[in-house]
Amino acid sequence: MKLKIELVKSPIGYKHDQRETAKALGLRKMHSVVVVEGTPQIRGMIRKISHMLKVEESE
């Protein structure tokens, strides 16, 4: 299953590891969107910074 992830809140002002997690997901700028496979590792990263993201399932 694919997940569509959008960065809707800036990581500025959050802890360094949260900013790095957003970068690792491929989210560099506000409102950037990536489509990734829904692996357990990716879901853990999403859970860590869920307050900054909008996540939808896509095919």
Image: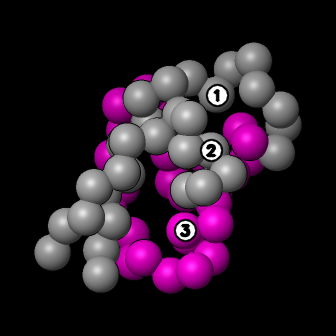
Q: Helix or strand or loop: what does disc 3 sit on?
A: helix
What stretch of residues is rendered in magenta?
A: 18-45
Q: Quadrant of the C terminus?
A: bottom left
Is 29 in the magenta?
yes
Mark 3 — residue?
A: 43
Q: Compare residues 53 and 23 and report the one nearer the observer.
A: 53
Q: Is residue 20 left or right of residue 56?
A: right
Residue in the picture at 56% in, 35% down = 51
Q: Helix or strand or loop: what does disc 2 sit on?
A: loop
Q: Tell me which numbered mark, 1 or 2, is placed earlier along the sequence.
A: 1
Q: Give coordinates of residue 44: x percent, y percent.
A: 64, 66
Residue in the picture at 47% in, 31% down = 29
Q: Helix or strand or loop: what does disc 1 sit on?
A: loop
Packing grade of label 3 (10 A; few <14, some 14-19, many >=20) is few
Q: Give coordinates of residue 9: x percent, y percent.
A: 50, 24
In the rendered view, would you say 18 is above or below 15? below
Mark 2 — residue?
A: 49
Asked if marks 1 and 2 touch (Cβ < 8 Å), the reply is yes
Q: Tell me which numbered mark, 1 or 3, is placed earlier along the sequence.
A: 1
Q: Amino acid at mark 3?
A: Arg
Q: Give coordinates of residue 2: x percent, y percent.
A: 30, 74
Q: Quadrant of the N terminus?
A: bottom left
Mark 1 — residue?
A: 11
Residue at the outermost top position: 13
In three-dimensional space, the C-alpha distance between marks 1 and 2, rounded to whole angstroms, equals 9 Å
Q: Amino acid at mark 1?
A: Pro
Q: Is residue 54 left or right of residue 45?
A: left
Q: Tell me which numbered mark, 2 or 3, is placed earlier along the sequence.
A: 3
